[in-house]
């Protein structure tokens, strides 16, 4: 029984000491992926339907982005946290993955304050 407990403790210690990066999950930007769930950034992107998909960072303010994905792979990554997708949405665009817009700050002061017309 003691041997089993010692082996179990060693197995747990090895599991805890293992690096965070994996072969299948927690992939860094630029590494090949088959789905967004594999990437640390939660975005697996490809340029064309025939190209390989890679992990990319999410879109900064003013960058072209996609609202959502249908096949777990984006043509453009979604916006960073705190930014909002600003663009058209259509049913066909969601199937063909062509609903593209730009990342906007929802608290942007230039949108809130508009000059008065006399």
Image: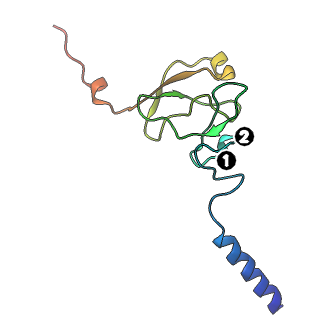
Report the colour scheme: rainbow
Foreground pick, 105 / 53: 53
Q: Is residue 26 above or below residue 82?
A: below
Percent x, y of residue 70: 68, 30
The local secondary structure at tag 2 comes to loop
Q: Is residue 79 above or below residue 87?
A: below
Q: Residue furthest top?
A: 118
Residue 38 circle label: 1
Identify the residue shown where x is 58% and y is 45%. 29
Identify the residue shown where x is 58% and y is 21%. 99
Residue 81 circle label: none
Q: Are marks 2 and 1 in contact (CB under 8 Å)?
A: yes
The local secondary structure at tag 1 comes to helix
Quadrant where the C terminus sits is top left
Percent x, y of residue 75: 62, 28
**Mark 2 sits on what residue?**
34
Q: Work out how far the residue at label 2 is from the one at label 1, CA to CA, in angstroms.
A: 8 Å
Foreground pick, 64 / 30: 30
Q: Is residue 39 above or below residue 103?
A: below
């Amino acid at each position: 029984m003691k041997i089993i407990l010692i082996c179990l403790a060693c197995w747990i210690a090895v599991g805890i000491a293992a690096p965070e990066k994996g072969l299948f999950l927690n992939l860094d930007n630029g590494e090949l992926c088959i789905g967004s769930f594999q990437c640390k950034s939660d975005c697996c992107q490809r340029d064309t339907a025939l190209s390989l998909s890679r992990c990319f960072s999410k879109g900064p303010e003013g960058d072209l982005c996609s609202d959502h994905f249908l096949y777990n792979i984006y043509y453009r990554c979604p916006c960073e946290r705190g930014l909002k997708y600003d663009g058209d949405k259509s049913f066909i665009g969601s199937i063909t993955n062509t609903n593209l817009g730009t990342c906007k700050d929802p608290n942007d002061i230039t949108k809130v304050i508009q000059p008065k017309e006399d």
